[in-house]
Image (cartoon, rainbow, N blue to C red):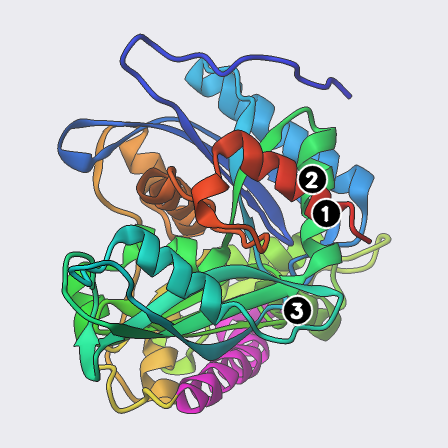
Amino acid sequence: MGFRKKEQEKGPEEEIFVGLDIGTTKVCAVVAAPGDHGKLNILGIGNAVSDGLTRGVVTNIDRTVRSIDGAVREAEAQSGVKIRTVTVGIAGDHIQSFQSRGVIAISGSEHEISRADVDRLIEDTKRVALPADRRIIHVIPQEFIVDGQDGVFDPVGMSGVRMEATVHIITGLVTAAQNIYKCVERAGLSVNDMVLEPLASSYAVLEEEEKEVGTVLIDIGGGTTDVAVFEERTIRHTAVIGIAGKKVTDDIRKGLGILSDQAERLKKEHGFAYLPAIVDNEPLVLPGIGGRSPIEIDKKLLAQIIQPRMEEILEIVSLEIKRSGYSKHLFAGAVLTGGGSLIKGTVELAREVLGMPVKMGIPAGFGSGLVREIENPMYATAVGLILYRLRHRDRSTISFDTPKKHRSVRHMISKMTEWFNEL
């Protein structure tokens, strides 16, 4: 396996960003450069089959490294860019989230709130007791309260003597993040940021208006289904469910007694998640195994295998939405994305199970390059990782319990290495 020790190529005024989505069934690398009016120019896309993860968590280092290497090489060949650093996603049912509060006093003669005060307050909200095997991945402000006045979203420049904040804290297992980091490093790359996948996907497929009035993003991948609830332009609840598209493929494989590759192809080409959506119930002929006679089924039989599992996934999502406490605030409904959402009839089934408007979320906002190729729900996370990094490139999104003013990129990588080597 070739390990890369290359510098990332860029033109005199061109900055290159790479999103690496390490999924249960596929690894995807997307190379992009910022274009005019905030749009992305997609330079290259690389895909590789992934079989080193289970429910979004690395279970085989060598296989995952090979998959990363394959996807990155394809993206390099297509873009003509030598990739050295990537923004990588993290998911898995080990992800947990909760709310926290913090409070500080504002010093200074004029009591004007500065960015340093906000950073100090965010640090205060992190003073929570966590098990030794867990670390904070993201701290997302919900609202600020200045001298008892709530509903403040950007307090910088305001006057006050006391400032409070409510934040959404997302945590993950140290070992899960450590193994992702190891795989990327062994593929000859370095990580400049690690981002929760549903948060990343939201940057690719959600409009600001949807986040303001209330929406839920449902990213159905291969190994996990990621849920993110938004209201008043900020994330209010996150969850990662360990059931997704691979379970549907397994159901087809077991139900029809066929190979996994055949089941996956059958799901993609002829599968329906909603029986009433079938118009032409044409027969499907499957080759027999080991010289046996071909098997004949129809689309309705296939849907009878697929629909119960997709219903189960969406029912768990519905429970998560209720648990968030925002089920009555989601006036924009739900947005589906991810490769697992591409099964025909999924939108219709989601409308029925969730009881709200549902639409398909497709990455958008591209200037030039591989625009048609990238406008597919399966690329939502990889594109979202780039957009997230673009917006937050001056700040580390992983908490290392160090003051933010010391977090240069080099320092961030150093602290990341220390964090991942703790266990």
Contact between marks 1 and 2 (CB within 8 A): the answer is yes
Question: Could you tell me residue 315's position as x and y percent?
Answer: 48, 87
Relative placement, left or right, of 16 versus 173 is left
- Taking the spot 64% from the left edge, 54% from the top edge, the residue there is 24
Question: Could you tell me residue 28's position as x and y percent?
Answer: 53, 39
Question: Could you tell me residue 398's position as x and y percent?
Answer: 53, 51
Residue 382 visible from this viewpoint: no
- Give the prevailing secondary structure in the magenta stretch: helix
Q: Which residues are magenta?
A: 296-324
Task: Describe the element under mark 1 as helix, strand or loop.
Answer: helix
42 vs 257, nearest the viewer: 42
For residue 96, which quarter of the picture? bottom right
Q: Residues within 10 Å of mark 1 (few under 14, many from 20)?
A: some
Amino acid at the residue labelled 1: Phe
Quick check: 377 above or below 125? Answer: above
Contact between marks 1 and 3 (CB within 8 A): the answer is no
Relative placement, left or right, of 423 versus 396 is right
Marking on residue 94: 3
- Taking the spot 69% from the left edge, 67% from the top edge, the residue there is 250
Question: Could you tell me residue 319's position as x and y percent?
Answer: 47, 89
43 vs 419, nearest the viewer: 419
Q: Nearer the viewer, mark 1 or mark 3?
A: 1
The extreme front residue here reads 109
Quick check: 369 above or below 396? Answer: above
Give the CA separation, mark 1 to mark 3: 16 Å
Give the CA separation, mark 3 to mark 2: 21 Å
User: Which residue in the protein does label 1 denote?
Assistant: 420
- Taking the spot 25% from the left edge, 54% from the top edge, the residue there is 114
User: Which residue in the protein does label 2 denote?
Assistant: 417
